[in-house]
Every structure is written in structure tokens, then in C-alpha cells.
């Protein structure tokens, strides 16, 4: 049965990296601090960087990083994660991810610039651009997933839209041991997730706190 999954990076004060975003800095000023432990893992080196030398950390962070890629049949992301906020009118823009994005599945991009033609990429990724309600996009992504899970990626606005609609079965937070004091707030207007989902926590060797909400 298809489940809807989200993995998010946050700080101890529940913030995400949304300040200082530009074409030269697409993930924001604090992204490196938030994702340092994940970026150091063996799984990240292999699955995202294409490094098959075995470099990177093992342990708790790596086990969650590996789980992030397992069982995914389709992905939903926001326009900013694709880069359309920086290049909204460029018909040749193919996103931040290079010629072979790390998805390998259909990816549905939520954008007000839709309709746009679908964009097939190397490695099995095909970007589809949609502007309808998140429920309708999820229905299409679920059908495309063929019984596997649908992962909702960033940015934080997209993740919050699915959480507020009650559509998320599994939420995994990677809480970096830092305080940002700036950036978007994850939890505003999202009460009671601990009542509808089972909560577990685990602290990694890096100090990252992994919190999971499972329906």
C-alpha cells in the first residue's frame, strides 16, 4: 500500500533554511549547517554525488539516509526545489539537479507556471509540472508510483501544505543540533501530529536528532 513520506531538515528551534536564496545560493544561507550530518554519510556520497569509493560516515545518520531512498515510486516537489523561482520564464531550464537527477522516478513539480511540457531526464527521472490542488497531484503521483511510496520533497511550503491537509503518513525530521533564529517555521498551525501519529526519537553519533511521526 502506498504511503506518503516526508523527510525534512530542521534546527532545534524548528527552522528551515529559507533565507538568502538566490540563483547562486539555491538552498539558502543555512543549508550547509542543517544538512552537514546527512551530507557526510556514505549514502549521500553514493546516491547523490555518485561516489562509489565507500567514502562517508556509517552509523545512525547513514541508516536514515539509506531509508530515504528505499521504496519510492514517485516524488512531489515545489517550484523552488526545481529552481523555477529563479528561472520562471526560461523554457530550457531543467532544474538544479544536472542531466541525471537523483530521483529515478516521475517527479511532480507544483508550480503556477504550469502547464509546461514534461521533461524526461537521464536515469529515469521525468519532471511533470502541475498547478492543481495537492490532493489531485497526490492522486496522480500515487497512480504513477505503482504501489510504491510517494515522497514529498521541499521546500518547506510544499511539505507544510501536505501536512496541513492531513495527507502525510510518515514524517522524518533530521534535527541538527543548531539554533538558527531565522528561516521558515515548521510547526506554525500544525498542532496534534503527535496525537495522530506514533512518535519515535533517536540521537545519532553526529548529535543529529531523528524524530519520526508514523500513522
Image (cartoon, rainbow, N blue to C red):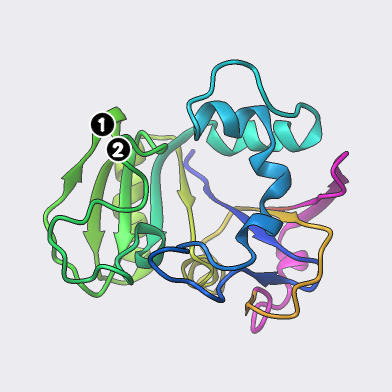
Camera-side residue of 90 and 171: 90
Camera-side residue of 156 and 83: 83
Assess disc 1: are there few (<14), some (14-19) or many (≥20) residues with their C-alpha within 10 Å of its C-alpha.
Answer: few
- Marking on residue 122: 1
Which residue corresponds to the image point at 25% horizontal and 70% vertical from the top-left? 131
Q: To which quarter of the image does residue 120 belong?
A: top left
Q: In the drawing, does residue 132 fall left or right of residue 201?
A: left
Q: Where is residue 145 in the image (x, y as percent from the top left)?
A: 36, 39
The count of marks equals 2
- Distance, label 1 to label 2, CA atoms, is 7 Å
Q: Which region is colored magenta?
A: 186-211
Residue 157 position (above or below residue 62)? below
1 and 2 marks in contact (CB < 8 Å): yes
Q: Where is residue 209 in the image (x, y as percent from the top left)?
A: 83, 52
Camera-side residue of 55 and 139: 55
Disc 1 versus disc 2: nearer the observer: 1
Which residue corresponds to the image point at 59% horizontal and 39% vertical from the top-left? 68
Q: Where is residue 210 in the image (x, y as percent from the top left)?
A: 78, 49
- Judging by the rendered image, the residue that carries numbered circle 2 is 125
Amino acid at each position: 500500500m502506498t504511503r506518503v513520506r516526508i523527510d525534512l531538515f530542521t534546527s532545534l528551534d524548528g527552522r528551515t533554511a529559507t533565507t538568502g536564496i538566490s540563483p547562486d545560493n539555491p538552498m539558502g544561507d543555512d543549508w550547509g549547517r542543517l544538512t552537514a550530518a546527512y551530507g557526510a554519510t556514505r549514502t549521500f556520497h553514493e546516491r547523490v554525488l555518485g561516489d562509489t569509493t565507500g567514502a562517508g560516515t556509517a552509523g545512525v545518520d547513514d541508516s536514515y539516509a539509506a531509508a530515504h531512498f528505499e521504496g519510492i515510486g514517485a516524488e512531489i516537489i515545489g517550484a523552488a526545489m526545481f529552481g523555477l523561482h529563479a528561472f520562471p520564464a526560461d523554457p530550457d531550464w531543467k532544474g538544479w539537479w544536472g542531466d541525471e537527477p537523483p530521483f529515478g522516478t516521475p517527479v511532480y513539480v507544483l508550480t503556477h507556471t504550469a502547464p509546461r511540457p514534461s521533461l524526461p531526464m537521464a536515469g529515469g527521472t521525468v519532471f511533470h509540472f502541475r498547478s492543481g490542488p495537492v490532493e489531485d497531484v497526490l492522486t496522480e503521483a500515487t497512480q504513477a508510483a505503482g504501489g510504491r511510496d510517494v515522497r514529498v520533497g521541499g521546500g518547506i511550503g510544499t511539505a507544510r501544505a501536505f501536512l496541513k491537509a492531513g495527507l502525510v503518513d510518515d514524517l522524518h525530521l533530521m534535527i541538527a543540533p543548531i539554533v538558527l533564529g531565522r528561516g521558515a517555521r515548521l510547526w506554525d498551525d500544525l498542532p496534534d501530529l503527535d496525537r495522530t501519529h506514533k512518535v519515535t526519537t533517536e540521537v545519532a553519533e553526529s548529535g543529529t536528532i531523528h524524530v519520526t511521526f508514523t500513522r
